């Protein structure tokens, strides 16, 4: 089982370059960064009693800028989004950003995608919250054609374009893997139909991880990799993840200044070493 770092990279914490170098130097497999384009002043919480959003949600840097910086200062670190909010994005531009990052990094991109929970945020982008899942299904399928075909076209309800040339092509063969975030029935159907990997949160019960693996196998999707987002330092839980055949675990890093972040990474690296 591999270990990576998940982070909200902001203007108030450690810089992108310093973070990426530190994560790679300490032997972690990947750096995963998230995004919010903005946070509306008035928004509906993701669930009742959720409370006020942490400050980091308001201040995230653009994930592709962060990961482009990371690509230039590392050699092997896997560059992951966890997640980009597909329904808020233009699919053709996003496909180009992903392919460009994969090219300049030498094929080190993993694309984690989600549909989002902030209805007001997505509405500001002209996205109807009621149809964001169906839109996301097409937004996962369409880039794979843009990445792999000389002349790509796609005709759906939400994504529709005639034959186009779209370059660069990714270094990944056939394309960067697309990990689907979420644990709902709709997210799992998206995973089954369109995903190359699954990105559940750490709160997902281990029994559910096993059930989904078997369910995917029953539908002809064997060995779909799983990457856990936001794990804590619970040795027993990590053992359970390994027994459930989880492929990678992302530890969520607290957003802090550089010196404190480096200390946190040292502690996490020592913790992982103690697991081996």
Image (cartoon, helix red, strand yellow):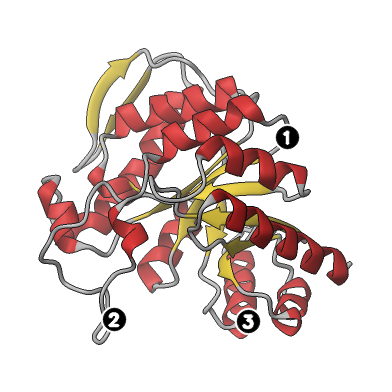
Q: Picture coordinates of residue 138 (x, y %)? A: 32, 44
Write down the residue under mark 1. 76
Q: Do the residues labelled 1 and 3 touch (CB within 8 Å)?
A: no
Drawn side of residue 37 relative to residue 67, left or right: left
Q: Callout 3: 10 Å neighbours few (<14), some, many (20+)?
A: some
Write down the residue under mark 2. 50
Report how far apart the C-alphas of labels 1 and 3 lie in the structure.
30 Å
Q: Which residue lies furthest to the front in this view?
A: 259
Q: Which of 129 and 32 is in front in this view?
A: 32
| Quadrant containing the C terminus in the rendered view | bottom right
Write down the quadrant of residue 106 in the picture: top right
Report how far apart the C-alphas of labels 2 and 1 lie in the structure.
37 Å
| Quadrant containing the N terminus in the rendered view | bottom right
Residue 261 showing in the rendered view: yes
Where residue 206 is drawn, which disc sits there? 3
Q: Which residue lies furthest to the right in this view?
A: 276
Q: Picture coordinates of residue 32 (x, y %)? A: 54, 49
Q: Which residue is drawn at 64% across and 28% down?
A: 73
Q: Callout 2: 10 Å neighbours few (<14), some, many (20+)?
A: few
From the viewer's perspective, is residue 228 above or below residue 37? Answer: below
For numbered disc 1, what is the local secondary structure?
loop
Q: Do the residues labelled 2 and 1 touch (CB within 8 Å)?
A: no
Drawn side of residue 181 relative to residue 216, left or right: left
């Amino acid at each position: 089982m591999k270990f990576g770092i998940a982070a909200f990279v902001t203007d108030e914490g450690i810089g992108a370059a310093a973070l990426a170098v530190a994560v790679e130097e300490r032997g972690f497999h990947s750096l995963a960064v998230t995004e919010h384009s903005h946070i509306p002043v008035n928004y509906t919480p993701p669930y009742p009693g959720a409370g006020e959003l942490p400050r980091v949600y308001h201040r995230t840097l653009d994930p592709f800028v962060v990961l482009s910086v990371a690509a230039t200062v590392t050699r092997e670190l896997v560059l992951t989004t966890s997640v980009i909010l597909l329904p808020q994005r233009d699919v053709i531009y996003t496909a180009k950003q992903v392919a460009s990052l994969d090219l300049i990094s030498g094929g080190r991109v993993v694309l984690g995608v989600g549909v989002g929970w902030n209805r007001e945020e997505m509405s500001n982008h002209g996205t109807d919250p009621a149809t964001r899942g169906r839109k996301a299904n097409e937004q996962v399928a369409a880039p794979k054609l843009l990445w792999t075909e000389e002349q790509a076209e796609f005709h759906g309800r939400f994504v529709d374009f005639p034959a186009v040339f779209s370059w660069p092509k990714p270094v990944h063969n056939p394309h960067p893997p697309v990990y689907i975030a979420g644990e709902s029935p709709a997210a799992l159907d998206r995973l089954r139909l369109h995903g190359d990997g699954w990105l559940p949160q750490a709160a997902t019960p281990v029994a559910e991880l096993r059930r989904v693996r078997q369910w995917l196998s029953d539908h002809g999707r064997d060995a779909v990799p799983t990457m856990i987002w936001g794990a804590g330092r619970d040795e027993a839980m990590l053992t359970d993840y390994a027994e459930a055949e989880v492929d990678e675990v992302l530890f969520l890093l607290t957003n802090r200044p550089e010196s404190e972040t480096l200390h946190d990474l040292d502690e996490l690296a020592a913790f992982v070493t103690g697991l081996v």
